[in-house]
Image: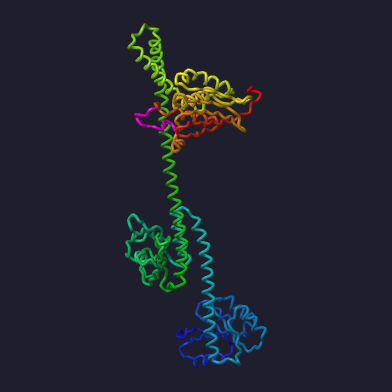
Amino acid sequence: MVNESIRVLLIEDNPADITLIKELLREVDPLAFQVEAVQRLAAGLSHLNNGGADVVVLDLSLPDSIGFDTFAQAYRHAPQVPIIVLSNLDDRSLAMRAVRHGAQDYLLKEQVGGELLARSMRYAIERKRTEEALRRRTAQLEALREVSVEITSQLDLDRLLHSISSRAVELLDGEGGIVSVYRPDEDVLDLAASIGFVSQPERARWQRGEGFVGRVWERGEPLVASDVSVCRDTMGEEETLRQCAEIGVPILWGERLVGVLDVFRSPRYPFEQGDIELLELFAHQAAIAIHNAQQYESTRETARELRMAVAELEELDRLKNQFIQNVSHELRTPLALIRGYAELLAEEELGPLRPEQRKPMNVIVRRCRMLTELVEDIMMVLEVEARTPERQWVDVEELMGFSTEDFALSVEQEGLELSAWVEEDLPALWGVRSHLRRMLDNLIKNAIKFTPEGGRIDVRAYRETDSVVIEVADTGIGIPPEEQDRVFERFYQVDGSINRRYKGVGLGLGLVRAVVTAHGGSVEVESVVGEGSTFTVRLPVGERTSDED
């Protein structure tokens, strides 16, 4: 400040005082002060319009204004210029009022000397600059807060990057700027958004250390230059380059480079430390916003891929079901004919069999029955999933009576015991009779299949709160704990090897779960290897209406 030439606007109507003040300042330093004197307030205000003053020395008694109003008019006209009142009026209240409303000092002409006046002016200028810097910094921080809220709420990446570049330019009163984004797959910085260019910048990609942007990347910290040829002069028809001041900061997510943000403006207004700090703060917010937007884009892409995968799986499932349904329908008729003729042959309705023919014929009949049951199970699974059959009230005791009666012969042949118990006054179930019958049949058939000779199977039905519970317990081989969650999967078998002891395709328990789920219930199994298994089905109790009785 000492070596700067201070432009002083002296608004004073007394020529003698003008001469005295000039001489006093010349005695302090003949080169430090450039004094421009005017004798009317109007002339002083006109001079301030041209921005030609660093400080105003103001007399309150002028030909065209007097008293506090003189100061008030000057302050309103140029609040950014510090004003020192130099008056003959020894009025304490007036002095305090002027200082309270923005005057940097109030001096009496009879007491002022050159050193005092020079010191007062230097202090006033420095104080005003400090106040202005503080005001500007406060405004910048508030603007930073506002734009940070704005950009962190933006999830469209392209819009976000353009918003970052334009907001950064606004924060630093720049002429233009660019945002470049790091591409880790290619190890380059790509131009992502720009502002202040008539056309696209000549360079749109940078290697590490290449150009101003590449040097910011290489350094990993802010970089300031005062002579970068990036500013465009578009006053004429053709665009030309001119020198600019430029500032660049890395956009970092933790220690990972996200991109580089830089702003340029006229070299008449070089970037200072406060600008660097402000842009670094903004770059930190930009990193958060870019990371959020990239995560959002990634999530959207993943969601889109998942939707496509689900749609593809649903279509494959539909085609699979359609194929199974078509094949099952095609198998039904010829299989029924084969089974019918096989049974007629086995029962010797079409003529006597030789002893060596009877065993193979019985095998054919058993296998035909197995194939028929398999096709019926497949068709029922598809039917259950379609949920097309009409429902009716199903008596549980009657349902269990039919099933246990049908399996009586099989149980006897396998050397097993089968018992059934139904709680009295058990409510009926609202469902599809054939589906519920097949569900119970498959549970009993499964128990017979995996229970060795001499074992026991118990079927029980009772009420539990708002559910009817059906249990099928056996003393069979049991199921390992790690397999118990999977036994209800279609076509899953605990022993899936080709040489397994227990034959089947693993569809029975899958059908059980499909039927139970379609009826709004649940099924679970408890089992101990070597001791047996208990399958528990819970089906909701419905409310019977008068129309359904």
Q: Is residue 160 above or below residue 491?
A: below
Q: Is residue 341 above or below residue 373?
A: above
Instruction: Determine the residue positioned at 46% across, 63% down.
Output: 284
Q: Identify which residue, 407 or 17, lies in the foreground.
A: 407
Q: Is residue 8 above or below residue 250?
A: below
- Res 379 seen here: no
Residue 67 relative to residue 390: left or right: right
- Residue 198 is situated, as x and y percent measured from the top left of the image, at 39, 61
Name the image quarter holding the C terminus: top right
Residue 406 relative to residue 350: left or right: right
Q: Identify which residue, 454 or 332, lies in the foreground.
A: 454
Residue 495: in magenta span: yes
Residue 78: in magenta span: no
Quadrant of the rendered image containing residue 57: bottom right
- Residue 134 is situated, as x and y percent measured from the top left of the image, at 53, 73
For this orientation, the residue located farthest to the top is 351
- Residue 535 is situated, as x and y percent measured from the top left of the image, at 51, 31
Q: Is residue 477 above or below residue 44?
A: above
Residue 208 relative to residue 430: left or right: left
Magenta: main secondary structure: loop
User: Which residues make up the magenta segment?
Assistant: 489-501
Q: Identify which residue, 371 or 487, lies in the foreground.
A: 487
